[in-house]
Image (cartoon, rainbow, N blue to C red):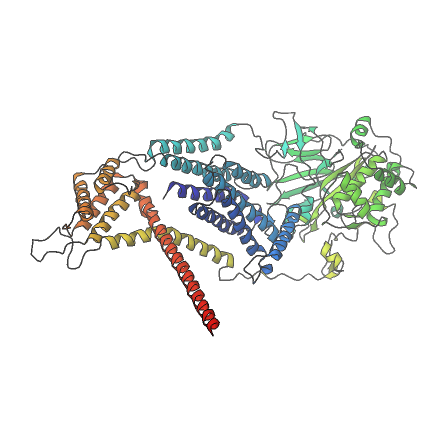
Amino acid sequence: MTGRTRLTLCSAAAVMLVSFCLEPLVKPAGWILHAAFLTAAATGVGALGRRLRLPRLLIPAAQVAAVGCLLALGFARDAAVYGLVPGPASVSRLVQVLQGGVNDVGNYGTPAPATPGLRLILVGSVALVAVAVDTLAVTYRRAALAGLPLLALYSVGTGLDDRGPAWLWFLLAAGGYLAVLFAEGQDRMSRWGRVFHGAGSGSGGPLTGGGRRAGVAALAVALAVPFFLPDLDGGLIASRLGHGGGRGGGTITAINPVVSLQSDLNQPDNIEQLSYTTTSKNAGSMYIRVAVSDDFDGVEWRPSPQRVEDVPSPLPDPPGLSGAVERTEVTTRIAVGSHLRQEWLPMPYPASRVDVPGRWRFEPNSRTVVGDNGQKTLGLSYTVTSLDLDPTPEQLRAAAAPPADIAERDLALPADLPDVVRTTARQVTQDADTPYDRAVALQDWFSQSGGFSYNTEVRAGTGIDAITSFLRRKEGFCVHFSATMAAMARTLGIPARVAVGFTSGSPRSDGSWTVGSKDAHAWPELYFEGAGWIRFEPTPSRGTMPDYTRQQTPAAPGADDREPRTRPTARPSAGPSTTPGCTVQERRAGECGKPVTAVPKAAPQRSAWPTAAVLAGAAVGLLLLALLLVPMLWRTRLRRIRLRPVDGGGGSRGGPEGGSGPPELTEAQVIAAWQELVDSAWDLGIAPDGAETPRRTLERIAAAAPLEDGPREAAGRVALATERALYARSAQAPAGLGDDVRAASEGLRAAAGRWTRVRAVVLPPSSVRMVWRVAGRYAAVRDAVRDAWWSARRRAADAVGGLLRRGGRG
């Protein structure tokens, strides 16, 4: 195997090794096989272009064109000409699939379903990275720079999902990059001349062996060092949550917690996030809060940096809550499922005591509990004691002005806030006299009288542009309703912020409740002195309105004002019931609110036959195995042909002159025996040189791999017979050269290292002669076809000319 071929294969292998870090992003992961096929195709096109000595700029262009054609056939075949030839319609269709993938990126969390758009993005990205790596490492021989596209692919995979084995992804990526560097170094050294190794040194040589040892040591150190360093919980991608070490202090600086809401709500399946049991009599109205966004800078609502401390027991009293507000102590036992992995601890608000295992910290302002040094919620079970508050409208109307610190922090607005936000808030609340009445008016306008509709397909956002667009289009989901109401409340002098968490979920027959991904929600919290921070519900068809706000809105005749029409009852019904919520598709089809009869779901029947994905994977595996076996099988067959005994004889050296001994070998048989000896040395790392004589070649082989006396003499007899066959006028060749070739080959193998002997059998470098032979036959066929074509054209031209001449004479 030549140095460039080795470098090409290592580059393709490195891309596939790094691409495994993308595996947790999309399930099922069958797209990896498609990416491997495109990577192999791009690598093959590059190798062919270099073989044909195309200009270097044309090689990556040809690779990109090949990848584009294969992507069009894979994702837009229905628009191809005759289903095989991509055309303009295929390009348009491919763009549509890509746009769908971009939308899916914003709609789904990880692991996302394997939609055509997401598969196109993943497969296409891996293929383009393969083109970039092949171009840098092989075409332009800049292997070190090839690490940049590999790093980009690794960063995306590990940054978007941190649930996989990070150490394994790093090991695969770093190992692939080191393999590219080693292959490039060997290729560079081979172009300066052959590097000779002593007996038993293996094929690596001192320099290569030292490089391998250094690479392995570097990987080991890189994997071990993080265990002895403070947990940075980040890396190349910004940390989700960072806070100071030590006891009793630190700062929380978190990313926006509302960014994943849309993806959770648009998941095709309602994946369970947590379950709980509670002593609350109003479990159907319970909200489980996760985080709070109180900093509105005009670009988005996000959590402000806050100081954290040890979790006290009990927790301090909620800010602004007086003893006059009626309260009930509630105990809730929460069990987090296998899909909710985050730093914030889900809790009812306001919590008064938390009994949770692990390392956690408390943020007094938002009364949230956050993980310390990488602590996550995955699989956690804990108990929360909280207060079920029931302020009266009279208490809220009589609320005093907020304290200075809360007013300064939670009334702040960006200087460029559009006037439409302020003017709309004043118009909606013009008939309200108190801050409480204005807050209720805003809630009722969004949820009932304002003409707003709920749609999770609207682009998510909480900044100025998203708010103004939402007020104009009057269409969005909980993120838009909560962010807009909070901003409008601040313009009216009411401290406000946005809370993120879950609604109460769905009841089970055993009295517990289950909360799924579709129960993710955002709502505004407004501050009233004496009651503290209390929630409002402006989003129509989602959640429940608090009693202290619904009492201001007369209920429809016969309606129960204690429970919303979209909330399931706390006790399951035996008969048909309406759905607790409607998807966008159901509302558009007019199916929202239709009775749904509970029908026991039959257990899925698993087919005894393997699935198409399994069959495809097995076929690809068998094909790769067959490709790996081709060089070994071809080399074995060629050796047998070259060394097969001549007719009438076996393996003894020469018979008595004029007797009945084995016949002498022909010149072609002698040359074949010599080529077999040269190729055996080539397979063991000693490349041939066609400009040398057999005797000089033998001296070089013996210097590279010292032979014992028996194998050296056998190789000498083969070289002498070859020189006589090539240069003597007439020469008698002994019939036992086959035995001499075998003896010399065994001596060469004995002098080589173990891995060199394995490579000589599995991937013999001399099998490149097969490629040369195929290329030669292809060239011969091409020339023959071309000659036949020109000959046919010439005969046709002569025939036409003859007819014209005869016609002219007539």
Q: Percent from the top left, x then y, of residue 200?
A: 27, 36
Quadrant of the rendered structure where residue 237 is?
Answer: top right
Q: Is residue 354 left or right of residue 439?
A: left
Residue reaching furthest front?
Answer: 809
How many numbered badges does the structure rendering display?
Answer: 0
Q: Is residue 192 left or right of residue 516?
A: left
Quadrant of the rendered structure where residue 320 is?
Answer: top right
Q: Nearer the viewer, residue 5 or 448?
A: 5
Residue at 87% in and 39% down: 423
Q: Is any atom of residue 284 visible in this view?
A: yes
Say which quadrant the N terminus sits in.
top left
Residue reaching furthest bottom?
Answer: 810
Judge whether 83 appears above or below 135 on screen. below
Q: Nearer the viewer, residue 685 or 598?
A: 685
Q: Percent from the top left, x then y, of residue 512?
A: 67, 49
Q: Is any atom of residue 516 visible in this view?
A: no
Quadrant of the rendered structure where residue 487 is?
Answer: top right
Q: Nearer the viewer, residue 506 or 326?
A: 506
Q: Percent from the top left, x then y, of residue 32?
A: 52, 49
Q: Percent from the top left, x then y, of residue 726?
A: 20, 47
Residue at 49% in and 29% down: 225
